Amino acid sequence: MKVILRFVLVFCLVWAVLAGLAQFVRLAPDWPIWTVAVGVSLSVEAILGLYRYERSAVAPGRSRTLISLRFAALAVLVWILVEPTWVRTVTRDREQEIVVVLDDSASMDLQDEGEELTRGEIAEKVLADSGLMEKLEENFRVRQVRAARSVLAHNAKREDGWKQATDLAAALGSVLEQVPPDELGGVVLLSDGRHNRPAQVEETARRFGILDAPIGSVAIGRAEPPKDAAVLRVSAPEAIHLGDRMRVSAGLKFDGYSGQKAKVLLTRAGELLEEREISVPQKNHREEVRFVLTPEAGGVGDFRIEIAPLEGERFSDNNGWDFETSITDARTNVLLIDRHPRWEFRYLRNLFYGRDKSVHLQWLLLNPDRIEGEEPEKVPASAARPFGEAQATSLPVNEEEWRKFDVIILGDLSAADLDGETWAIINRCVSERAAMLVLVAGPESMPHALSPEARQLVPVEMEWGNATYYGTRSQPFRIGLGSSGVGHPVVKQSQGAVDDGAMWRSFPEMRWRHSVRSLKEGAEVLLVAEEGDTARQASAEGLRDALRDLANRRQKEAESALLVTRQTGRGKVALLLTDRTWRLREGSGDVYHHRFWGNLVRWGAGPILRSGSPQVRLGTDQLTYTPDDPVRLQARLREKDLAPVWDESLRAEVLRGGSVVATVDLSPFKDSNGLHEGVSGPFSQPGLYQVRLRGSELARLSPEEQITTGFRVVGSRGPIELADTTLNLPLLQTLADLSGGEVVSSTEIDSLASLFRRDEGEREEVRETSLWSQWPVLLLLFAILSAEWILRRGAGLP
């Protein structure tokens, strides 16, 4: 009875103390007060029980000291457990900040016609002479930064190549990141407005407007372009297979050369590949020129598009654009299986076997035409067969052979054609080995009649069953881009400025496609069937109907889907819901048909590793990087029979000028086809870098060849900074309109002082001080426990 009464008293005392403490500080919400009180009461009883046990073995004074230390340690532990935090609100005057952003890119180093100073020197002079900084400092904190490829403090060191691009979006974005929203007064931007990085400035400017922080721009430069010719941009593939056509497009500008002719040259390693002559019809002319070539040699091609020098050019260093394309002879292993030789199968077989030398094809018909009385020789499909031996008469013999294929294309197969174990192997090839499975729909069985084991790979839901769709006739449709198809590499058909969507809609009408009920989670629609006018119009009901249409869009897209993809484990599954892609050949040969299937196969097969031996391949995700880009390194190790090899010790050494500047561990992707991957960089120093592979398996797999590759770091990917040097007044005006600011000339800069309004209100801040994680509390607990241990051991207690 005495113990129970003491337990209740201790519980009430602890509960009252903690409840009172909670009126002044915040306690940990994870521990209700009553649970702490119960725990303390039980601990008190345990300490008292231990005291009664030990007091007969030690002196009374020592036993009282021990129990006192234990109670003290318990109190400190409870203090730490409830995590008391002192929370209070403080009020202080609001202090706002104005950030002055000075454009320091290469275009600001130009001296305009009739000017004695460069644009950058003019900006610094008007800023100093106007007294704007002093006026702003009377009411605001003022900080100055410089912007080009990235943002630096006013006096910070600039790396080589830093000036070779202008990223105004990053400059304004850094201001938003560094200055608290309620302290941001605005920005003064001195620039020619030549933003040439991918990020859009409009969204950033809107955020300034929301914060009532105007952007005041000082326009520096001339809107009238100087007499000049330049390469504005180049679009070229990072990598192609040897024997493939390489398509290159370049945007050109000619200012001040009306009525003249210009020569455009495409070279590789200094050797002229093609020359075009262009007529310039007007004073300010823009034109896109395209080249199509088939490189005859592999390796990394150093290409250059150049405008031959013209008389009177203001700049000569923006006439050329250097780019690199990796040309590799590594082949993609593709397995094509169908039941009958339908048209889709025939054109695919002919495409990959006779047209595309980058593909090592194995094809198989499960129900081919046969001559009565003749039994064909059994030839299992295998990626290890010599290139050119494509026809097989039976499926791969085991899972190891299946795993050697990068892409598996299945036509109109019935549920009986592949058993459950085969589908399980295919599933593992996709989800573990990272292969791609392409299912080409057919009226007989694919994919509606597949077995339950196979349906889990299909990225859509439909009416499953054994019905056939031979008699199904749908409305004529054209092919359009789905929501995920815009910009997707699989459906890229156009070159340069031509819209991909318009290109797909220009292909012939089709009449058969498989119906779909819904999409599975994670599925993406790249192509859709467009029947008649599919443009969405706003109804008279207004916003409510628009929101309803937005909610139903995924379902509508599913019902009209033609190409659906889905990430499945480490691999991909693509479902083509029509067997009429061969009609892309109509009127154009195999150009668009080949482009579509080539894009699909390469996208699904994974990265092209451009360097190495047949068994060891090494590459980077790009050939050219800026100092802001990370470098993704990838290596693939395989036996002679294409079986994957794993090397836990594999690493890549990155060298510059013969010295190792970074070492990266390459982690294996288990159950893939021997792929290892790592990330390094970014690397701030421009120049050529070499990557060298190290690992315990290399001596066995490639004993006579050191595996290396290379990449280049440049200030920018081309001479974009000097490609167009005119004052971009519309961009500066857009920044002003969206943020509530204004644009002034260099002579009116002092008027910006009145643009920024000081908020003289007070700011309330909630401040928190932790009372339990301070070092004196932890030191006190350590001291108490140490003293208790010393006394206990000194008395001979355990």
Image (spheres, helix red, strand yellow):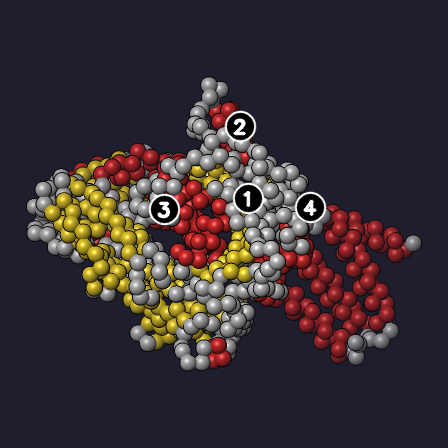
Quadrant of res 242: bottom left
Q: Earlier in the sequence, mark 1 or mark 3?
A: 1
Image vertical order of residue 560 relative to residue 368, above or below: above
Is residue 607 toward the left or the right of residue 378 in the image?
left
- Residue 548: mark: 2
Is the Cβ of the residue at disc 1 closer than 8 Å to that at disc 4? no
Inter-mark Cα distance, 2 to 4: 53 Å
Inter-mark Cα distance, 4 to 3: 86 Å
Q: Nearer the viewer, mark 2 or mark 3?
A: 3
Q: Earlier in the sequence, mark 2 or mark 4?
A: 4
Q: Nearer the viewer, mark 2 or mark 1?
A: 1
- Residue 20: mark: 4
Question: In the picture, which quadrant includes the C terminus?
Answer: bottom right
Question: At numbered mark 4, what does the secondary structure look like: helix, strand or loop?
Answer: helix
Image vertical order of residue 623 relative to residue 348, above or below: below
Q: Which residue is mark 1?
A: 441
Quadrant of res 536: top left
- In this rendered view, identify the residue nearer to me: 557 or 529: 529
Q: Residues within 10 Å of mark 4 (few under 14, many from 20)?
A: few
Q: Which amino acid, by three-letter code, is at mark 3?
A: Gly
Inter-mark Cα distance, 1 to 3: 23 Å
Inter-mark Cα distance, 1 to 4: 72 Å
Residue shown at 70%/50% (left/top)?
Answer: 31
The location of residue 754, given as percent across then percent down, is 26, 35
Inter-mark Cα distance, 2 to 3: 43 Å
The location of residue 162, given as percent across then percent down, is 27, 58
Q: Nearer the viewer, mark 1 or mark 4?
A: 1
